[in-house]
Image: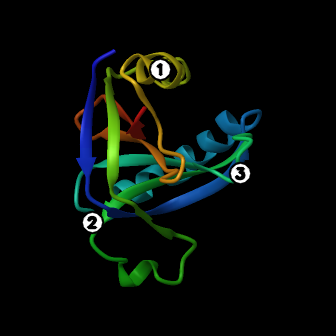
Amino acid sequence: MDIRLEEHKSFVVCGYSVLTDLENGDRDVGKLWSGHKEELQGLSGKSSGLYGVMWYTDDTHKQYFYMLAVMIDHMEKDHAGSNIQRLEIPEGLYAVASLPDGADLGEAWTEFYFKELPARRLETDHQHGIFFEWYSANGGVELWNPVKHI
């Protein structure tokens, strides 16, 4: 797995989120994608593509929020009264893995998190706490994990 380290500045995304868990995540996240993908792709964002943003609700890592989002400069006036949400992704050091279209994301995250990061003497920066997937409009996906050196 090809991994690079990247210092990334904070940025803002807007989209829709769902509180889910490991058992129901595939179903709940699938509903977000089928219900909001086209709407979000139609927003004027800073970059083309979609973000799948995740953060855990507690230290057990059983429940988490997943947000399907786009990067924005500011919240559009016509979305101010809707259920669309805004989230700032904090700056930090990220380990980034690039995957081809059709890659099994569950397997990729498992290999990335449990094998590749420790092999590089990195661990997740849980104080940062926000992980994301970047789905480029040109195809492919990147896994972004906040890290610190061990």
Residue 134 image position (x, y, % from top left): 35, 41
**Residue at the image position 41 percent from the left and 81 percent from the top:** 78
Check if mark 3's residue and mark 1's residue have beta carbons within 8 Å.
Answer: no
State the residue position of label 3: 58
Q: Residue 140: which disc?
A: none
Closer to the camera in the image, 63 or 58? 58
Residue 102 image position (x, y, % from top left): 41, 19
**Quarter of the image with the C terminus in it:** top left
Q: Is residue 61 above or below residue 71?
A: above
Residue 22 image position (x, y, % from top left): 72, 34
Check if mark 2's residue and mark 1's residue have beta carbons within 8 Å.
Answer: no
Residue 145, can we see it?
Answer: no
Q: Amino acid at mark 3?
A: Asp
Residue 113 is left or right of residue 60, and the answer is left
Residue 11 is left or right of residue 112, and the answer is left
State the residue position of label 2: 44
Residue 76, can we see it?
Answer: yes
Mark 3 vs mark 1, foreground winner is 3
- At numbered mark 2, what does the secondary structure look like: helix, strand or loop? loop
Mark 3 or 1, nearer chain start = 3
Closer to the camera in the image, 25 or 92? 92
Mark 2 or 1, nearer chain start = 2
Q: Is residue 57 above or below residue 146?
A: below
**Quarter of the image with the N terminus in it:** top left
Q: Quadrant of residue 6?
A: top left
Q: Amino acid at mark 1?
A: Ala
State the residue position of label 1: 108
Residue 74 image position (x, y, % from top left): 31, 76
Closer to the camera in the image, 60 or 51? 60
CA gap, disc 2 and disc 1: 30 Å
- At numbered mark 1, what does the secondary structure look like: helix, strand or loop? helix
Q: Is residue 111 above or below residue 15?
A: above
